[in-house]
Image (cartoon, rainbow, N blue to C red):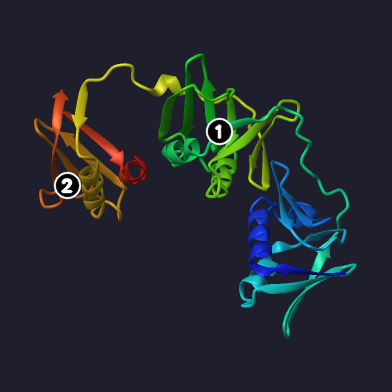
Amino acid sequence: MTIQLLKNEFLEKLETSSRFASSKLSSTTSLQGVCLIGEENKINFYSTDLNYYYHTTLKNESNEKFKIIVEPRKIIEFLSLLTEVKIEVEIKEKAVIITQGKIKGQFPLFSDVDFPFPPKNTEEKQKIKISFFKENLPFIFFAVSNDETRPVLTGVNFVTDDENLKLVATDGFRLSLLTLKKNLPFASMIIPAGFLINAQRLLNKEDEIEFSYLKNEKLLAFFIGESEIYARMIEGEYPPFEKVIPTEKKTTVTIDADEFLRSVKLVSVFSKEFSNIIIMEVEKESVKFIPKVGQGEEDVVYQDAKIEGEAQKIAFNYKYLIEFLSHA
């Protein structure tokens, strides 16, 4: 069978779907692919790595019915080099052939046996403004760990009580905590940061989205326009982050944020080749920034500040400071 498609629409759907397919060569081939199912006037796209599930649709005038699994990477690369608007997709028993004018590409199909589809959602859907994601999550993501040997640290910890919703992330070296008024029906859970990042990429065309928590499957589902994304919650005990947050303070520094970032970047020039550590000396009316190594008076930056409390001398990894200040 042959169907006509708009190249850019097909490419966009395939690219997005491929982000949720498994990238591990040890996984079964079907998990590395994208499943396409043709129905009346639409094509369904499915992909999963068993932790994330993705589903979206593409409107199509064809009524052809089919089910295939394609390896997306080569098709995406091929399509991105085509110049015309439309393409022809011919589906055969063991291959799919994409044609545009005199250009033709053939791509093998994966076996579609036992492809895992997302569960049916029977839970009530709640609505949430996308401003919640765009305004809050950037303050959290930079502190999330990439260490898969400690799964709980690769997620964002949502902690709720009667009044507040706390978003927490840590990689063991820095911790980011954001406290919000609880006006959203979130339960306490650890949500994979990768899932939230991928969900954010789909938010540009929407003002609000719907979500559900599938308790039996321990999945969180987002419904964004024509797309559905499911993520398996991270199980485990999150570190007791409250214990590392000081309950009292000895010094308060009020400082211009943009100048603070510039000062850190300036002194980092002299730290990059050594330890990445900079020293901040809090004095009466200013903060002095110096590199830990080579602390000569030549390599120093001063910034005016309002100081309340005791003088302090603190060491920081400048990279962590820059990441935080860039999102603050």
Q: Position of residue 282 (x, y in %)?
A: 16, 33
What amino acid is at disc 1?
Ile
- Which element carries disc 2, helix, strand or loop? loop
Q: Indicate left or right for 253 with 45 as reference.
A: left
Q: Position of residue 211 (x, y in %)?
A: 63, 34
Q: Indicate left or right for 122 with 321 as reference.
A: right
Out of 8 and 275, give the one closest to the viewer: 8
Q: Position of residue 234 (x, y in %)?
A: 63, 32
Label whose residue precedes the other's in the sequence (1 or 2): 1
Among all residues in the image, which is located at the extreme top? Answer: 162
Crowding at mark 2 (Cα within 10 Å: few <14, some 14-19, many 20+) = some
Q: Which residue is label 1 attached to?
A: 128
Which callout, 1 or 2, points to the residue nearer the camera? 1
Q: Which residue is label 2 attached to?
A: 295
Out of 74 and 58, give the one closest to the viewer: 58
Cα gap from disc 1 to disc 2, whole angstroms? 50 Å
Crowding at mark 1 (Cα within 10 Å: few <14, some 14-19, many 20+) = some
CB under 8 Å between discs 1 and 2: no
Q: Position of residue 187 (x, y in %)?
A: 59, 23
Task: Locate the C terminus by quadrant.
Answer: top left
What amino acid is at disc 2?
Gln
Disc number placed over residue 78 in the picture, else none: none
Q: Residue at x 76, y 61 (%)?
A: 60
Q: Is residue 239 visible?
A: yes
Out of 118 and 40, give the one closest to the viewer: 40
Task: Locate the N terminus by quadrant.
Answer: bottom right
- Which element carries disc 1, helix, strand or loop? strand
Q: Quadrant of residue 7?
A: bottom right
